[in-house]
Amino acid sequence: MSQANEALFAGLHTDGYINGAWVQAPEDKRFEVLNPATGEVLTTVANLGSDDAMAAMDAADAAQAAWGKSAPRERADLLRAAFDGLIARREEFARLISLEMGKPLAEARGEVTYAAEFLRWFSEEATRISGRYGSNAEGTGRVIVSQRPVGPCLLITPWNFPLAMATRKIGPALAAGCTSIIKPAAQTPLTTLAFTSMLDEIGVPAGVVNVVPTTSASSISEPLLADPRLRKMSFTGSTAVGRSLLKLAADQVLRTSMELGGNAPFLVFEDADLDAAVQGALLAKFRNIGQACTAANRFLVHSSVAEDFSARMTKAVEGMKIGSGLEDGVTIGPLVDEAAVSKVSELVEDALAGGATLHTGGAAIDGPGHFFQPTVLSSVTPAAKMWTSEIFGPVLAITTFDTEEEAVAAANDTEYGLIAYAYTKDLKRSQRLIEDIESGMLGLNMGVVSNAAAPFGGVKQSGLGREGGPEGISEYLTTRYALTPAP
Ligand code: NAP
């Protein structure tokens, strides 16, 4: 390990965190965290179980009353200190993200900034929680509406954005006055633990934030979702796991926010600025090595520009540098594990067997590490498995269309509805797309739409609820009213 990485790990907490204390585990109850670029073991982390989940529930429940009544300014100041802390330590957090998840360092720095922005945004939202006072229709009574914290929350995060997915949940939970229990992904617990350690240092009270790393997710989620003291679950991950957790959440009638999978269409119309479309496509497809819920999955390109678009994408992709995220100039890091490489390989083989044309890439790269060549395919048909499932890898699949109606129908032909992208210079068409595309988010001549000020989330089977924007805090608040006689 390099000197810089040794220094990073020297001060790192690798235990659970419950009620303001680090929960250690003996060697035989720890799990390995691997560097996907090399396969080397970075460190081991305490593997917590159901008893720890219950201890975290006790702590979150005990802390809820005081935290829920704390001054909004106190919560805002803590969130602002967390924002300042992340920005000051951006390089350290970026290295950690890159090491345990694999993304290029430049993108990891971008994730830290993006993650920090949720803390700043929700520090500002914390002091703006309001109610209303008004008359009933008859004029005989007064309605007093207030918003209260929902209560203790279970926050479950995926491995692909280990910091941003955590702050997008912890930020609004803290701002609203909710306590929480966080279950980070088993492949990337280190970033969450480093962030928790920072929250501890800046003085977030004991029990307000608890973290339970584990390799047995259900041993944490099942007892918690059965406990009536838990009042909310916020989950980011696959639609399949989200669906099963929703069923469990129904027993306690929990508030839920579900950020699930996607199958994003990327539409390039005949009047698009092709240079801009290529730049947008590179971001929408290859950022995070294609492992993003927002990753463009299906490229629908007007037949008059398809050849030009494919040629430009191929040239750009052939110029990409593959390697460990920490190496200078790398744009394509490893996939998260070998299973991911196998899945992407199978999807590419299936598309080729179905008649797709390979322009570049198309194969896994021999280890160490879990690499797949950045790939461009055209003539991919709707029968290909990659057309209906998330590729979650650096593979760009193109098909063509001739009319706007055809393009919109194809874009909407999926049970997902997280995000869509469209490149066109036509204002009227843009307005029609805003109305007709079935997705929670639309990148209009933009390859990235994520922003702390915007309500991130999907429709259809891509999820429920929103993260970010003014909507983000309302997910952690519950509305109540009192009716009194008119004075
Ligand atoms: P995943 O397998 O669904 O896992 C997500 C999280 O859920 C992990 O922490 C995982 O723990 C946990 N989990 C799995 N089974 C569980 C259970 N029975 N009870 C409680 N927790 C459980 O998804 P992933 O592979 O990590 O992430 C990729 C998926 O996330 C993609 O589908 C992507 O589109 C989606 N995603 C969506 C958004 C969005 O905002 N819409 C953002 C990012 C990612 P382990 O790590 O221990 O398995």
Image (cartoon, grey):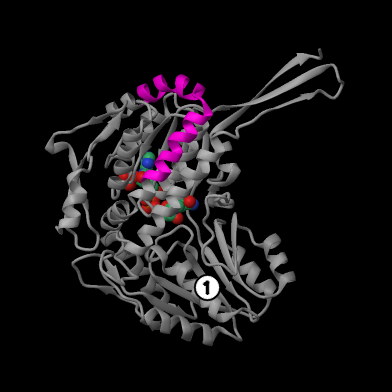
Residue 402 placement: quadrant:
bottom right
The answer to if 74 sits in the magenta stretch is: yes
Give left or right: position of 197 versus 270: left
Direction left: furthest residue: 27
Return the x and y of residue 336 as percentages of the image width and height.
30, 59
> Is residue 140 shown in magenta?
no
* x and y, in percent, of residue 127 in the image: 57, 33
In the displayed structure, 222 sits above or below 120; it is above
Circle 1 SS class: strand
| Residue closest to the eye, 415 or 311 | 311
User: Could you tell me if residue 281 is visible in this image?
Assistant: yes
The residue segment tinted magenta is 57-85
Q: Residues within 10 Å of mark 1 (few under 14, many from 20)?
A: many
Q: Quadrant of residue 286?
A: bottom left
The answer to whether 338 appears left or right of 385 in the picture is left
| Rendered position, 178 above or below 452 | above
- Picture layout, residue 292 above or below residue 207: below
The percent coordinates of residue 64 (x first, y second) are 45, 23
Please tell me whether the stretch drawn in magenta is mainly helix, strand or loop.
helix
User: Which image quarter holds the N terminus?
Assistant: bottom left
Horizontal side of 243 relative to 435 (left or right) equals left
Q: Residue at x 60, y 35 (%)?
A: 128
Of the pair 362 and 484, the residue shown nearer to us = 484
Q: Nearer the viewer, residue 32 or 64?
A: 64
Residue on which the image places disc 1: 299
Instruction: Tell me the residue at 81%/23% (across/down).
Output: 135
Residue at 32% across / 33% down in the picture?
200
405 sits left or right of 84 in the view? right
Q: Amino acid at mark 1?
A: Phe
Q: Position of residue 405 (x, y in %)?
A: 69, 72
- Give the quarter of the image for residue 132: top right
